[in-house]
Image (cartoon, helix red, strand yellow):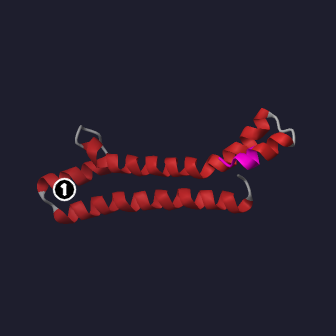
Amino acid sequence: MNAEVVEAARSFGSTKLQMLLKVQMPQALPTIMAGINQTMMMAMSMVVTCSMIGARGLGNEVLIAVNRVEISRGFMAGGSVVILAILLDRLTQGWFSNRKESGDE
């Protein structure tokens, strides 16, 4: 948090709500977005792990392929998980960069 910006907002008479919404949140947004991105990537990595305890979904396909030594099925299912993770990553980065450029911070 840039203390000079906070002090400038305080000296201009900003209320606590204005300080939060107009000064502190925009400064914290890159860190918040990095946390959201990392959480989504961790969730994608847990897809296969969760299938080991009975969860259904795309991770289950990877687990079946590994158990049956079906290499092509494993590549397809694993590749799908990776592509989905990349798409989610790019979508969140694109959303954040669009907000940053338009000044919606």
Residue hosting label 1: 65
Helix, strand or loop for disc 1: helix
Side (left or right) of 12 relative to 101: right
Query: Please, which residue is most extreme toward the top here?
Result: 16
Side (left or right) of 51 relative to 11: left
What's the magenta region? Answer: 1-6
Residue 27 colored magenta? Answer: no
Inspect the image, locate mark 1, and give the three-letter code of the amino acid beneath it.
Answer: Ala
Residue 26 in the image: state x and y as whole percent.
68, 49
Residue 28 in the image: state x and y as whole percent.
62, 47
Which residue is rendered at x = 34% and y = 50% of the image? 45
Which residue is rendered at x = 41% and y = 52% of the image? 41
Which residue is rendered at x = 32% and y = 47% of the image? 47
Residue 2 colored magenta? Answer: yes
Neighbourhood count class around disc 1 (C-alpha, 10 Å): few under 14, some 14–19, many 20 upward = some
Quarter of the image where one finds residue 14: top right
Side (left or right) of 69 relative to 105: left
Query: Please, which residue is most extreme toward the left here?
Result: 68
